[in-house]
Image (cartoon, rainbow, N blue to C red):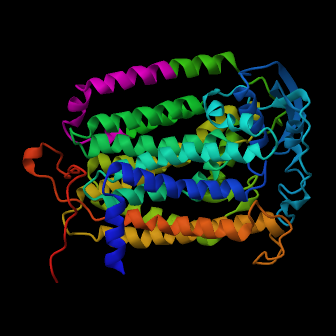
Amino acid sequence: MISALTRAADWSARTPKRLWAVAFTLFFALSASWAAATPLGGSPDEHAHFIRAAAVARGQLGGPEVMVPHMVAGIEGKFAETGVQLPQWYAQLPRQHECYAWKEGTPASCAPALGHSGKTVQVTTAAGRYHPAYYLATGWPSLLVKEPHGLYLMRLASAALCSALLAGAVVTAAEWRRRSAALLGVFAAATPMALYMGGMVNPSGGEIAAGILVWTALLSVLMSPDARLLNRRLARVGIGGLVLINIRPLGLIWFAGAVFFALLLQQRGVLGQVLRRKALWAWTALLGAATVGALLWAGAHPDNSVINTPKTLTMKEAARQTFGNTETYVHQMLGYFGWLDTPAPAFTWLVWLGVLAVLTALGLVYGRGREVVALLGMLVAIVVVPVVAQTLQAEKLGMVWQGRYLLPFAVGLPLMAVMTAAGRSPEGSFPWRRLTGFAVAGLALADAAAFFWTLRRFAVGTSGPWVPFAAHWAPPGGWMLWTAVYTAAAFAVVLPALVRDREPAAPEDGLGQDGAARPWQQRPRVPAAG
């Protein structure tokens, strides 16, 4: 059985194109399952992003500012929203979730049916000031299917974008000599929350997927150098960076953070070789232009919302509350679904945190000097960055921080840890493939549990039966179909993770001391008899 799985894993990774296609298919199946199994508007602020995407697809990059009364975390205020012209049924989207959001025992069947009126009216969106690039990539299906069913196609467009970025990270990780270990880092970074957001129309999904690609490619460039692979790795850094910088205002900060920590982990002498590549300067110019464009867009579209924050919410109080919410933010990065009202089961959190703890411990054990400092620095940053960000904006916007905001940066922790440990551990000193197999299988089970638990909440509510045969709400195709698809795809991820490691690189290859990957055409290592 194990031998058959290993042969299938080696087949899936025979060429970069084949591995990319396999990884894309699996990630798309996972994110598309979330897209189908979540009620329309059933994720944070999705109604605003639906409206923004449909408007951008129709050429409406901006619109008049409209002050809309709103309440955030129990605090009253007025949101500065953007008015756009869309079919009348889009105006119903902001109310779709109100009857069941934050009411865990209420299934999604209470949501009113969306109309089909094609009459054009003004609709407002709180996402109107965001950069239009992501919305152009996800809004175009609304032109093909102009009724509410087109919203599902918009979700699938988002799932395809995120899956393509994640598949690029998988191919990059597979270029390492100990590629099973590197792949484990990618799969640990792709938390259930990352896959969930990937299936929604929300820029967070693309931001997280781009973060995983940027981290994987940057660490490969600087920790596992290979002159033959450098240009394609720089291209992946560039593509991921373009998405990350243009998708949300915080993207530039997350990209800069990834560069900083990757430089701390670089092998001696690698940076000089990278700086001599023309491809680096070409991508740097593109990223620089994208940065200027993103900053100009943000400067021209400020947030003029007015939140009546209480006088007691001082910077000191905001810092205290944010620090106290650290555990909640960590849980939100792993899995907190719906409108942050549907936490993943404790089993999911325990398994994921257990795998992350093991990988971090291995990185600290095998790491040296700067590597240990980088890992400890990342752990500190995961706690401190939300405190600083929330403190600076609390008096204006209130306590609005969510764990997923940090996830594009925090995904670097498992990637840094596993690549440090895999690169430093002596040959044959640690059973990496065995760890990868058990860890990815555990993550798959935890992921499937989170999906079923969330789907059950929408179908019958948390107080309903454990198996929702008599579902009050059901996704297109039924809950059993998508549970089966998601579970099968989650466990199929184990297959590429079982791929055999590469032979150590020969000294004349001029590669780093960790032994970077040989060409893809190399045959996998055959274990010795006995």
Residue 44: give x, y in percent of width and height: 74, 47
Q: In which quadrant of the rendered image does the C terminus lie?
A: bottom left
Image point 25% across, 33% down: which residue? Answer: 271
Image point 62% across, 43% down: which residue? Answer: 158
Q: Residue furthest bottom?
A: 530
Residue 281 falls inside the magenta stretch: yes
Q: Is residue 388 above or below residue 272?
A: below
Let me know if residue 190 appears in the view: no
Residue 134: give x, y in percent of width and height: 61, 33
Residue 4: quadrant of the picture:
bottom left
Q: Identify the main secondary structure in magenta.
A: helix
Residue 197: give x, y in percent of width and height: 63, 49
Residue 304: quadrant of the picture:
top right
Please give left or right for residue 79 compared with residue 381 in the image: right
Q: Nearer the viewer, residue 203 or 102?
A: 203
Please give left or right for residue 376 compared with residue 471 in the image: left
Q: Is residue 299 above or below residue 169?
A: above
Please give left or right for residue 10 compared with residue 527 in the image: right
Residue 339 falls inside the magenta stretch: no
Please give the range of residues in magenta. Answer: 262-290
Q: In which quadrant of the rendered image does the N terminus lie?
A: bottom left
Q: Residue furthest left?
A: 508
Image point 39% across, 62% down: which residue? Answer: 496
Let me know if residue 465 appears in the view: yes
Image point 92% across, 37% down: which residue? Answer: 117
Q: Nearer the viewer, residue 279 or 218?
A: 279
Residue 81: give x, y in percent of width and height: 81, 27
Q: Nearer the viewer, residue 22 or 202?
A: 22
Give the mark count. Answer: 0
